[in-house]
Amino acid sequence: MPDIPILVRSAQNADLARMMRMRQHARRVVMHFGQEDLQQMIAQGGCVVAEAETLLWGFACAARQQPGLAILRGLGLLNGWRIDDGLVQLLRPLEASLRARGHQHLMHLAIDGWLAAPLARQRFINHDYIVHFERATPPSPTLPIFVLPDVNLRILAQQEIDRLVALDHQAFDWPWQFSRGELIKWLMTADRLVVLEHQQQLVGYACVQVHGEEAHLVRLAIAPGWQGQGFGRYLLADALDFSAARGAATITLNTQWHNTASQRLYKGFGFRAIGRRIPVLLKELV
């Protein structure tokens, strides 16, 4: 590419059509979201574009994941623009904008393998991996096999959301904790979100989405003090039975490579890892 002065600025709604066209035609594009999400990120100041005169050279978009943490959700580069050059031009102003809004870290799920090595050269570190598991839904109910005494499986009331936030943050380390907003969203939209009570305490919860013949276990969490007592198996069996009753033929889930306890639980229920591990890249914004 010739040495052309490139302007990098905050994206505006007028840039949306050009960004979507780049998604269709450029070879190096990461864009795992729809137009509505893109409009929201632009409105929140989470997108930058690089241009020379009227030609769009690239874009980068990030969204708030939880307090202090943003996730790099989209990036596109004009065919022929060197990846490292484009990343330097785009990430520098994007990271400055994120720091100004109080974010200390930027995360990226490297589903598209071509971006992992270039981001590593921009001081992203490999924090973990995401592993995808799958199994067929059971032909007959499994919950009766895992009956526990003195447990109450129920729907969470909306006014209990703070209890759910506390439980989730006890069960998961940063950066895997759900924010209050995310949990409210799942409470309102999930096909099933249930909590498990024992001795008048919330000991765990599970969240399931069903799309046609495929169900997805969004979350299964057990409070640290109650792990290893069968509560996880109970919630997982309920999720399997619910998915089968809704007509799903398979159920999938994601977990972290370093979460060996969860992997033992899922493998014990017949789940198998499929596909490749997805690198979780993390950069401290200093």
Image (tube, rainbow, N blue to C red):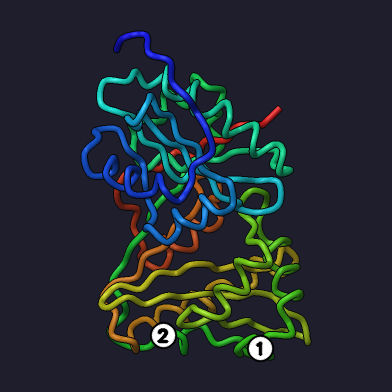
Residue ID at (77%, 81%) = 201
Within-10-Å neighbours for mark 2: few <14, some 14–19, many 20+: many
Q: Which mark is residue 151?
A: 1
Most distant residue in the front direction: 53
| Residue at the far top in the pictured view | 3
| Left or right of residue 85, residue 160 in this image | right
In this view, 1 is above or below 184: above
Amino acid on which the number 2 mark rests in the picture: Phe
The residue that appears at 43% across and 64% down in the rendered structure is 268
Q: Is residue 197 above or below residue 205?
A: below
Eye-nearest disc, 2 or 1 = 2
Q: Quadrant of the N terminus?
A: top left
At mark 2, the secondary structure is helix
Q: Which residue is mark 2?
A: 242
Return the x and y of residue 151 as percentages of the image width and height. 66, 88
Q: Is residue 250 left or right of residue 261?
A: left
